Amino acid sequence: MLHSAPAAQDFFWDDLLEYIEDRRVIPIVGAELLTVPDASGNDTPLMSVLAMQLAARLRVPAEDCTGDDALHTVVCRYLQRGGRREEIYPRIRTLMKELAPAVPPVLRALARIQHFNLFVSTTFDSLLAQALDEERHGGLPRTQSIAYAPNHTQDLAADARRSETPTVFHLLGRMSASPDYVITEEDTLEFFTSMQSESKRPGVLLDELKSSHLLLLGNSFPDWLTRFFIRIAKSGRLSLQREELEIIADRSSAHDAKLVLFLRNFSYRTQVYEGSATEFVHALSDRYLARNPGVAAAATDGLPSANPGTTEKGSEPHAMKPGSVFISYSRADSAAVETLHAALEAAGIDVWFDQRRLEGGDDFDAQIKKNIRSCSYFVPIISASTQSRHEGYFRLEWDLAVERSRLIAESVPFILPVAIDPVSEAEALVPERFRAVHWTRLPGGEPTPEFVERMVRLIRDHRKRERGLL
């Protein structure tokens, strides 16, 4: 259980690194590695913060909602008051988008271990995939993400372990507006029960788990679930002789005397690390990089850099400069927005718009949220498409812009709606604040000289205000 003499520990680390370099190790990553800084700069569990905010949103007591079962506790209290389980999942998605948590450093450390190509996540967020993209691909979204759910069975590709592109398999679902991911203990039961069904069994993944060494990092499963999970992963009686080992690193397992006793007697190839998952990952990453110098720097060699004002298709957004314009639009209006963007850029205006066009259940990027807060002008594109879509990513952007506009003097323009289709202002499905400002009508998104001239004038006015000249 990694409490042996230093020499024995050195053998342990050396053996583990050999297995990793042979690509025979799969990390199974849990919520303990997900943290956000609090007001004092200390790390706070992301799921505890999410549980507290969910409790406030649902208007249920939040006392004692700080442990590994914090979300489960909040949901139970809501159900006891007559709430419906199905109402929880879209609210969690909304809260996660509003939180827009940054990638924790420990996930970055894990992502730097280049010989890890297959990861299993037991959480519903996409921070691990984001860490891999940022550490290995310069922010380009190349990581393959797969999500299992009882009503939407997905399995691992047969060649995933040999692919140069990393894969994150969300074993307990990925965040969406539907109840397709785990937030309660009942969800956990349903997911693991489904995996035992022949028709819903993710066979390729389970075969990979069976034949690999496993790192259970920060999952903090209850005693019974830890035993059950290892039994499922190994597809056989735990007391039978096997070559592959499992290493458990989390805040609770080493202190669970009954679990340790069980593993010592019935699963001798399972070892429990006496320390936190974060400590384990950083120790492992440091040793790996010492054996493989330069591997982290090599990961991003030759990657293209994007224009500061816009993003290449598929790249991460960059910070906006003062005097920049943020264009918010529906995916169906991409062609019109490209035309608009080209005209403004030709006039020397820094314009940002997300060419990836995140929609629906996609994850809310922290940089996008920051750009809405820092842009000088926000241009929402109103169209037949936005009228037909009652749900969309652009609506979240619109709400964030309205929030920011409340901090800006009414005499200072900020939200500048552009209608590219004949949509009536009275009937438009837009925030009320949009109706209080002047709309520009550009049929098909074709910019007029007057519109471009007005935007140039607004940018000049902004710069004068910044210098105290207005």
Image: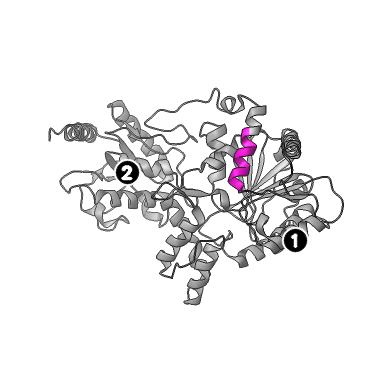
Q: Name the residue rendered at 20%, 35% in the picture.
A: 462
Question: In the rendered view, does 372 fall on the left or right side of 426?
Answer: right
Q: Is residue 24 above or below residue 350?
A: below
Question: In the rendered view, does 196 fall on the left or right side of 126?
Answer: right
Q: Regarding mark 1 in the picture, which secondary structure is present there?
A: loop
* Magenta span dominant secondary structure: helix
Q: Which residue is mark 2?
A: 373
Q: Percent position (x, y) of residue 184?
A: 58, 65
Label 2 or label 1, whichever comes before in sequence order: 1
Q: Percent position (x, y) of residue 297?
A: 56, 25
Looking at the rendered structure, the kind of residue marked 2 is Arg
Q: Regarding mark 2 in the picture, which secondary structure is present there?
A: helix
Question: In the rendered view, does 270 fall on the left or right side of 50?
Answer: right
Specify whether residue 2 is in view.
Answer: yes
Residue 196, numbered circle: 1
Q: Name the residue rendered at 46%, 53% in the picture.
A: 96
